[in-house]
Image (tube, rainbow, N blue to C red):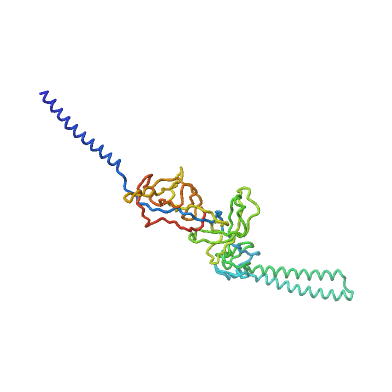
Amino acid sequence: MTKRMIIVLALLGLVFGGIFGFKAFVNTQMTKFFDNMEPPPATVSTASAEPAQWQPTIAAVGTLFAANGIDVAPEVAGKIEQIPFTSGQRVEAGAVLVQLDTATDRAQLDVLRAQRDLARSELDRQQALLKRRTTSQADFDTAQSQYKQVLASITNQQAVIQKKTIKAPFAGTVGIRKVDLGTFVNAGQAVVSLQQIDPLRLRFSVPEQQLSKLALGLPVTVRVDAYADQGFVGEITAIEPSVNAATRNVQVEASLANPERILRPGMFARVAVQLPGSDDYLTLPNSAITYNPYGDSVFIVVPAESDEAKPTVKRSFVKTGPRRGDQVAVLDGLEPGEQVVTSGQLKLRNGSRIVIDNSRLPAAEQQPELENK
């Protein structure tokens, strides 16, 4: 009985051992198969590294200012009687913006004119008496002084009345009014903003190291967030004669035409000062560069060795330079004419096979607009 059980157990061990051994063999063979199986080719888009000439620039940021801009305010206090303008209206130089009540001032002017007439009569009488030597020189001088004082008071009162008619000192666009009819305003209280916005002034700063490259008349290209797809062109009109000791920057001012008046004072602007000459670069679309902390790289296309084979890729580390729009300059690590992968890099590694499909390409303007990077 015991011998029979031993035989049965031995047979069972052989059977199960064969089964497990077979499964282990199959798993080993499948692992070898998948390990040696070549992944399918990745579909990518490509572009050639092309030489390009870029105009050198100095990038900066700045702020737009009105050619002339003020908060219109009266020089004297008074109650608002008229507001002839409409908020947002264009006005010419000398246009009346606000009229203050002058009834009391004009009444005072009439009193002063009556005093003038009386003082004139007294002066004439004293002059006649002086000729007949029936009055003293002192009385004549007093009458003459009183007459001149009244004339000065009249001139002063007329000036006060004129100051209550608030006019535009220059042509421009008025803002939203800050007062209403009947409001009593104090001297210096703002009633409306007046801005001359064509042309505009642009102020920006550049490092002192760039000072030798700046000159009056150099063109500048300006972009603002409100009109991101539109560039505005101006020219440098002034360079600060001193360098800021705290920032080591020099302030620059440019004039910018704004005939459509779409730019507004206070806007943040990205500036590119266009310098003379040109620089030669090897350029790629920005999407072709893989940026990493340990270095920037690209995947270069290696042509297939036969008609049946697929092209492959190799990773190459590159040194990048300036950027213009969708283009980036490559300073080292690439040769002119080499094909580089522009999309699908996440699926790639050295030696990966690829299928090139350039039916849909990432943005890559050949002559991009200047911008601050």
Q: How many marks?
A: 0
Horizontal relation, residue 59 to residue 288: left or right: right
Which quadrant, please, contains the N terminus? top left
Q: Relative to residue 118, is residue 66 depicted above or below?
A: above
- Most extreme residue toward the right is 133
The residue nearer to you, when weighing 13 against 112, is 13
Which quadrant of the structure image shows residue 103? bottom right
Quadrant of the rendered structure where residue 220 is? bottom right
Furthest residue toward left: 1
Quick check: 337 above or below 232?
above
User: Is 306 placed left or right of 151 in the picture?
Assistant: left
Residue under the point 42% across and 54% down: 47
Q: Residue 132 at x, y = what percent?
A: 89, 76
In the image: residue 4, left or right of residue 300: left
Residue situated in front as seen by the camera: 74 or 299: 299
Residue 11: x %, y % from top left: 14, 29
Please give left or right for residue 134 compared with residue 313 in the image. right
